[in-house]
Image: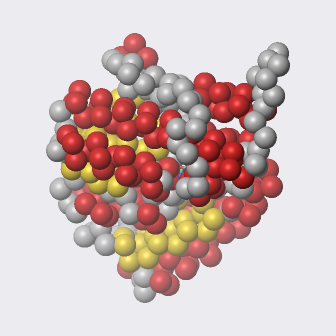
Amino acid sequence: MLAIESSCDETAAAVIDQDRRVLSSVVGSQFELHERFGGVVPEIASRAHVRRILPIVDEALKQADTHLSDLSAVAVATQPGLVGSLLVGLTAAKTLAAVLDVPLIGVNHIEAHIYACRMAGGSNVFPAIGFVVSGGHSNLYDCTDPVTFQLLGSTLDDAAGEAFDKVAKMLGLPYPGGPSIERAAQAGDPAAFEFPRPLFGVNRLDFSFSGLKTAVLYEVKGKPGSSEPPVELTPNRVADVAASFQEAVVDVLVEKCRLALNRHQRKTLCVGGGVAANARLRQKLEQMTSDMDIRLIVAPLEHCTDNAAMAAIAWERLERGQADSLETDVVPGLVRRAASDRR
Ligand code: KG4
Ligand code: ZN
């Protein structure tokens, strides 16, 4: 199966066999195009996908020593994401599926992030609580099996990765912010600042990071109307703010996973998405799950951030006869249940 991923700013293609072995996985980062803007610019992302998608598909086929005629299906991320970016991947996938006369399978990018855990945990990772912490999403799911994911909660404002990126910007650290904050935090004291832990201890499975972000902003730039001067951003202070912020985010993320596991009585936790690359988060998740006797599976590092190999979840649908028609469209927003349906 050829899989294509272009939901945000990574142009990616992979070849995966039916045993879910990744025969190739090529990821073209657009990092250098968006860096100076401090975030992803949608129109620039779409244009770069248009230029890069075919060479990247060719490269994935070449590395897997696979010819187009060997393919039995084409998978593509169709939701959620930037509309222009998604459309580039879907158009390429539809064209290949039509020309090769093979099934087209649309994939939910967030569910694919959770499925990336199968690359580390083997075939029996479900049922599980699935957790995606990325630049666009902080979502908890109850995953009954590989094709039944029920959204339990998500962020009310910023995603965890987005908060990392914005705080890094406030501290003058380079984009993308997650790895920069993690690096700076290594030299800092996580207890130096008492930042708020939004919704911690509240009996709901949603997240909110805007209050925490504002608390960091006030610390760095000073509180409006306050006579107290802001902290001087010496390297030591930056390290302390980074470490204290990271600790606050990690505490909330781990606590919500614990709550979801308890509520839904699952014995496995699958974690994926870019923020899952964070060593402090991994460490605290390990501690919590070992205390609760839960099996923790974190996606392999190379499959935490956006890639096409995680679209191997399409095999689950193909094996159940759930292919899509060539009329399939993209769904940019996250489809979620009404707030009143959530506990
Ligand atoms: O999953 P991903 O590649 O793209 C989305 O689907 O959003 O995640 C990217 C996000 C960025 O916000 C980045 O700052 C964050 O993941 N990230 C990290 C780390 N590595 C990447 N956040 C915290 N610690 C890291 N080590
Ligand atoms: Zn992603």
Q: Who's the residue at 68% across and 41% down the image? A: 166
Query: Could you say where residue 339 lies in the image, as x and y percent from the top left?
Result: 43, 17
Query: Could you say where residue 234 lies in the image, as x and y percent from the top left?
Result: 76, 48
Query: Could you say where residue 177 lies in the image, as x and y percent from the top left?
Result: 64, 51
Q: Who's the residue at 50% across and 41% down the image? A: 247
Foreground of the two, 49 or 187 = 187
Rendered view: 129 above or below 234: above
- Which quadrant holds the C terminus? top left
Q: Who's the residue at 42% across and 25% down the image? A: 200
Horizontal side, residue 74 vs residue 94: left or right: left
Q: Who's the residue at 58% across and 38% down the image? A: 192
Foreground of the two, 298 or 69 = 298
Quarter of the image where one finds residue 54: bottom right
Can residue 267 be seen here? yes
Can residue 96 be seen here? no
Horizontal side, residue 279 vs residue 163: left or right: left
